[in-house]
Image (tube, grey):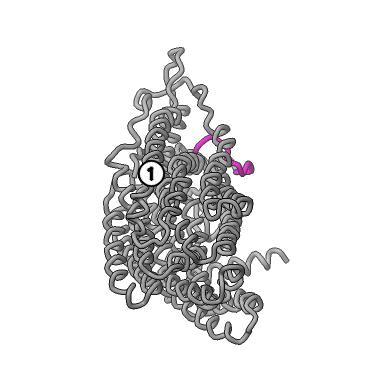
Amino acid sequence: MSDTGTGTEAEALPREAPPLDDRPRDALPQKARAEAVPPLLPGPGQPPCSGPGGTTALDAAPEPADSGEAPGLGSFLARAAAGTAVLTVLAAVLGLVRDQAIARYFGASDASDAFLIAWTVPEMAATLLIEDGMALLLVPAFSLALTRRADAEAAPGTDTGEPAPDPVRELVAATLPRLCVLLMAGAALLMAGAPWVVRVLAPGLADPDLAVDCTRLTAVTVLTFGITGYFSAALRAHRSFLPPAGVYVAYNMGIIGMTLALHSVWGVRAAAAGVAVGSLLMILTQLPTLLRLLPLARPRFTRLRKRASRTAPLLGLTVLAPVALFVVSRQSQVLVERFLASTLPAGAISHLNYAQKVAQMPMVLSLMICTVTFPVVARAMASGQREKARQRVERDLALAGMVVLLGTAVVLGYAPQIIEVLFQRGAFDTADTEATAQVMRVYAAGLLGHCLVGALSRPFFSSGRPTWFPAFAMGTGLLVTMGAGYALTYRCGVAGIATANAVGISTTALLLLMGLGTRVVPIRARAVALSLGRLAGAALVAGAAGWAAAQLVPDAVLSLAAGCVLVPAVFFLTGLALRSPEVVSLLALIRRRFTDGR
């Protein structure tokens, strides 16, 4: 993804304090701190969880006491993950409120389809510029710059009387202005070419003029999302996770506010204007913290070793191209879906959108773990600590898989109840609920694949050299999606499109899992697959139990409330029966903390 240098973990840790101001300072010798890449789970003192023969599938046991782990850093990551989780859940709730407002006022109609076509560009921009592309490029780049800054501050040198260049300031000066110019040009081109874009994305759309107007309103996100993503990457590299996690809270508030205030005057164009307003709020959410952590007015040191006196090029075409191709290919799955759905009756695009947004909530929550630990993996790779990186990646895959598969079980069991409770009001009727729930259950089959693609792509792009394998894997999955989509759409409608999505993304996930261990981080692919297979078995049993029990309670709210207790209980009990290390470890941690609390 980006060039990464060598150095120790201690050197890679930034000196700036994150928003969680109680983060402990390093208390170990430099060599010990250099080896520290702490786990998020299990915590210190946690008993190991045994699989067959008393061994663990993913080394769920804690690190030995003499492993050199920095005291408190694991707790900091846990707190950061918890804070990120809270803001992620809040953003998801506001996202549901946003979708409810659009469903209430516009239902599943030509107007909502037109808005969703226009929203395709912000969705792709968010993936490329905020969630994946910019983060995969810039988190390691800023991590390397911070490593060089710390190295220069700690090293002896000659004070010449002139301030030495700061690698972080040099990186910002070399990249941010050019990025803004490029993104402004892209936004202007999108506004001018909106009619052509709409024709390409949805040739069968009933009201293309409305979609063109909405596309022009949302085109500003090409610029604003780029700046947001840049700020987010810089803050995460500084171990400041809360402001980046809060950007979607601000974004959804902007869309909700504009929709509620102006829907009667502008129609669905009010929602498109809300996208633009919300994207501006995303920048403002991060700006105060960024200005505090990146004081660009003056250098922070005057001593600098000669080898670190200039910041080497951290970004270039050879680094950018593999990341951009991977991200564009990943988001192109949505383009394929909407292209195919535009040929179906009105409302098909809306049914796909509502189903996908709700079904992917477990995936979003699961990936927060990888978002928080990505800088740790990047610094471990930059320091040559491949074993530490392997342990971190394997733990992340196990934890993310457990979260997403538990959510998958809930979706499989209670999809109709979820959609009825969330959306069935106003213009969104019973038929829309039934159609959306059917698609949502099909999407659930691909949630593990989506989670693994997000989790596995990060270590690929933290290796310090460009790699094309993720783009190859994603391109292969996209071809599978296209082929299956064309084969199934006219036979199965929107369910066929969702099936193609699940098959394609699962293909990509399998390729990435097989390729990571031989190319970047030496993970044990078989052990990871076995662990995920046990969790998947628990999810299937829990989902089936929920599906059967959901029919016994006619009221949707009560049925869903009962399911939120039943499905997790069956999931964890089945996980225990299957001897899943993650389930055993989590329950042991809960039991121990409950016992200690007493």
Residue drawn at x 59%, y 49% as measured from the top left? 258
| Main SS of residues in magenta | loop
On whether residue 21 falls in the magenta region, the answer is yes
User: In the image, which residues are magenta?
Assistant: 14-23
Residue under label 1: 190
Task: Tell me if I can see residue 83 in this picture.
Answer: no
Q: Is residue 147 above or below residue 208?
A: above
Task: Tell me if I can see residue 592 in this picture.
Answer: yes
Q: Is residue 502 left or right of residue 102?
A: left
Residue 275 rendering spot, x and y as whole percentages = 52, 49
Residue drawn at x 48%, y 70% as measured from the top left? 405
Q: Closest to the observer: 462 or 562?
A: 562
Quadrant including the N terminus = top left
Local secondary structure at mark 1: helix
On whether residue 461 falls in the magenta region, the answer is no
Quadrant including the C terminus = bottom right
Three-letter amino acid code of the residue under disc 1 = Leu
Q: Is residue 226 above or below residue 340?
A: above
Residue 414 falls in image quadrant: bottom right
Q: Closest to the observer: 343 or 128?
A: 343
Residue 247 rendering spot, x and y as whole percentages = 55, 47
